[in-house]
Image (cartoon, rainbow, N blue to C red):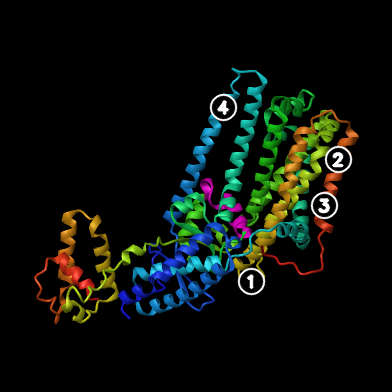
Amino acid sequence: MSTTTSPWDARKTELELPEEIDLQLEVANVGSRTLAILADIAFCGLVLFIVYSFSFLLSRDLATDWITRFGANAMEIVLLLFIFGFQWVYFNLFEWLWNGQTPGKRLLHLRVIKVDGTPVTWTDVLLRNISRPIDTFGPMALIGLLMIFVSRKAQRVGDLMAQTLVIHETVIDWSIFDQIEPAESATSAATARAPAIRLSSAQWELLHRYLNRREQLPADVRSRLAETLHETLKPLARGTELELSALPPEQWLVELARRT
Amino acid sequence: MTLGNFVRKNRPRWQRLETMLGVIEARGPSKTDRSFLQELIALYRATTGDLAFAQTHYRGTTLLLFLHQLVARGHNQIYRPHRLSVRAVARFFRNEIPQAIRDHLQAVTWSTIVFLLGLALGLSAVQFDERAASIILPTNVLNSIYSGHMWTGSIFSVLPAPVASTFLFTNNISVALLAFAGGLSFGLVTFVILFQNGFMLGVAIKLCADYGLLGALLEFIATHGVLEISSFLVSGAAGFVVANALLNPGSLLRRDALSQQGRSAVRMAIAVVPALITAGCIEAFISPSHIPVWFKVVLGSTLGLVFWLYLLFTGQSPRAVNPEI
């Protein structure tokens, strides 16, 4: 990757592991981080609304017996603690207990890690979250957004202080690599003897993604994609008996997958 | 090796690693047995090898993305720090917090100076022109002073003490933590918070003195005041430590100075939290009550003394203390 990437590109962070390999992780961008914060705020807002409604209902002077008054006081304390908790405890607690994730971050597959790839410690979590009034809450969010947008590892001020960064985790789905086993010699001797066809890794992935997804596709898309793929991959079968085979495109692709 | 063969050969290993990581992420390493961990580490090593191979031969594939992610998760689990133990917490409060304060006594001095500056200005502002008080004190407080009695009585008769104490300590902790975070604004926010609090106290003292309420005010402040003001001074000092790292990084990069100083500053800020909870409860339960004055004074000064003795003289163990965890 060239060093002159535009800020709009997905940025990768290069980490050197003790195992002597360069690990590339995708740095979370402005959009997903904003969404994660909004999700957290929405989540807390909902709970706050419920608590607030209860404390409001209880504190009306309609009921004057001491049980209701006690309840109203308790709800007021809960309300105060909740506002305080969202501001100062929520992010700290979740990022510490869930290894760098809050509910909002989990929803968007984000995670906070140290710049060297190790998990965050609770000091890091405190440092990056106590600084939120300076760069996340209210109008100060502009500073945080600008920092995330401009800085190379998308770090806001709190991230710089704690030396952390937020990564976007890839969702692993091995099923796209499901393979069609080569046909057994008993059923067709010709296939077993057939020479292997070499596909580039990108072509191989494309072929298998199609084959593993085709069951879920609408019929017309399924056949149209099969034709396109057939056209694209046909030159690779030159010199084998597949070149001349009159199989329908989809069957042809299955046969091709058997020979790779 | 073609990608197909590579996947066919190694996929069981990757999937096994993935399930094992799921288990250890959910349960934590202490609840898994030895053979599990050994297998996990062996699989992780093998997968890093696969990743290296894939980086060379299968550039730009989805498989490479998956392997990066898998190795990152493994790395995250294998190199995770120790969980928080009781001993680590004890050491944090016994050694690390007092040590952080002692390392930054200069910052504490500066925050005290700023606070006293505000206090002096508040006193002289009211001396110069009584109306200056209306800048900082709310109207109902002013009115009750002008009519010759303390405002605290009316406030605490409306608000039940448990609610008041919760309000006071959440509010005070928020201000204290903001004073720490305000260090990131090159100390500007920290300065304003300290100065404002000093100014408010100065104005209140002078105004109460003019209306013959000085004794009542001091009686009210006596119990929680020392602890509360000390806490603000310490958290303000934490903010100044951060600001100093930004303004005067010395031979370090600003970024590195910030993270290094931030680590000890956050300890100072945390020290303030239990102190302010105590102060808030005292302010709501004891300060407005009719307990004898001598008891309030003794309690208040003892708490302040204990706070400073703890910060300045305890936890000086000669053995090396691991700063992390």
The numbered mark at residue B308 is 3
C-alpha gap between disc 2 and disc 4: 37 Å
Q: Which residue is mark 2?
A: B299
The numbered mark at residue A56 is 4
> Disc 1: which chain?
B
Give the image location of residue B287, x and y in percent.
80, 33
> Disc 4: which chain?
A
The numbered mark at residue B252 is 1
Depth check, front residue: B145 or A211: A211
CB under 8 Å between discs 1 and 3:
no
**Which callout, 2 or 3, points at the residue further toward the start of the chain?**
2
For the residue marked with disc 1, what is the amino acid? Answer: Leu
Q: Which one is closest to the eye, mark 1 or mark 3?
A: 3
**Residue occupying the point 76% across, 56% down:** B108
Give the image location of residue A48, x and y in percent.
54, 37
Q: Which one is closest to the eye, mark 1 or mark 4?
A: 4
Local secondary structure at mark 3: helix
Give the image location of residue A247, x and y in percent.
11, 68
**Quadrant location of the N terminus of chain B?**
bottom left
CB under 8 Å between discs 2 and 4:
no
- Where does the magenta region start and end? A122-140
> Disc 2: which chain?
B
Q: Is residue B122 left or right of residue A18?
A: right
Q: Is residue A117 left or right of residue B291?
A: left
C-alpha gap between disc 2 and disc 3: 14 Å
CB under 8 Å between discs 1 and 4:
no
Depth check, front residue: B321 or B138: B321
For the residue marked with disc 3, what is the amino acid? Answer: Trp
> Disc 3: which chain?
B
For the residue marked with disc 4, what is the amino acid? Answer: Phe
